[in-house]
Image (cartoon, grey):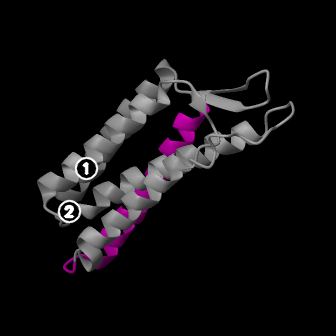
Amino acid sequence: MEKAQIIVVALAAIAFVIYRQTTPRPAARRAGLIISVALILGGLASDGAALVDPLHPVLAVTLLISGLLVAAGLGALRATTTRVWRDPHGVAWSQGTGLTLLAWAGSIAARIAMMALTALLGVATSQGSVLLFVGVTLGVQFLVVARRANALPGAAVPDAYAAR
């Protein structure tokens, strides 16, 4: 994929997810995890070996792993800002809050800072790493929200939306 295409895909995924996260919805839906896996696979497929700068392999791998750890941490942080509850029928629901939006702004700022640091250190930037960052941060957020939903007291019932 070209750099512009990757940026458009990443921004579209983030916009879609932020929109979906700010509306009440069943917490057990697997669509978020599927989107995360697709973004991670897209990031790996778009660059492959180019994810690591051959001129600075150790630094490039360190920055890539650091970026993915930051993505995971920010995903977990955003998950804690998400409201999770059970309705009277026992179905778990979730909805992002104003703090979730602020955490998203922080996540985007962190990714930009990581890209700036990579450029400052003279390491070639990989477009696929953007998709990896977004995929990891979303995946962790969805997993933590699902775990919180499963831990809610009350009778858990099969969610008709979970299979969708």
Amino acid identity at mark 2 = Thr
Mark 1 Cα-neighbour bin, 10 Å: few <14, some 14–19, many ≥20: some
Question: Which x, y percent locates residue 43?
Answer: 32, 64
Report, in whole angstroms, how far the alpha carbon at label 1 lies from the one at label 2: 17 Å
- Which label sits on residue 96? none
Q: Is residue 52 visible?
A: no
Residue at figure coordinates x 57%, y 49% from the top left: 30
Q: Amino acid at mark 1?
A: Val
Decide if residue 34 is in sight here. Answer: yes
Residue at left offset 36%, top offset 71%:
61
Q: Is residue 126 left or right of residue 63?
A: left
- Please state which of residues 30 and 124 is positioned toward the viewer in this rendering: 30
Magenta portion: prevailing SS class? helix
| x then y, percent, for residue 90 | 79, 30
Left or right: 105 in relation to 148: left
Pointer 1: what residue?
Answer: 9
Q: Quadrant of residue 93?
A: top right
**Looking at this view, is 29 or 9 the one in front?**
29
| Camera-side residue of 30 and 120 | 30
Task: Indicate the secondary structure of the residue bearing disc 1.
Answer: helix
> In terms of secondary structure, where does tag 2 sit?
loop
Which segment is the magenta one? 54-82
Up/down of 38 relative to 95, above or below: below
Q: Which quadrant of the rendered structure holds the N terminus?
A: bottom left
Instruction: Mark 1 or mark 2: name the one nearer the start of the chain.
Output: 1
Task: Provide residue 100's location: percent of width, then percent of height.
Answer: 48, 27
Give the label, 1 or 2, closer to the camera.
1
Q: Is residue 47 depicted above or below 146 in this figure?
A: below
What residue is shown at x 40% (from left), y 29% (from top)? 19
Residue 125 badge = 2
Q: Position of residue 47 (x, y in %)?
A: 24, 71
Please tell me whether residue 58 belongs to the stretch shown in magenta.
yes
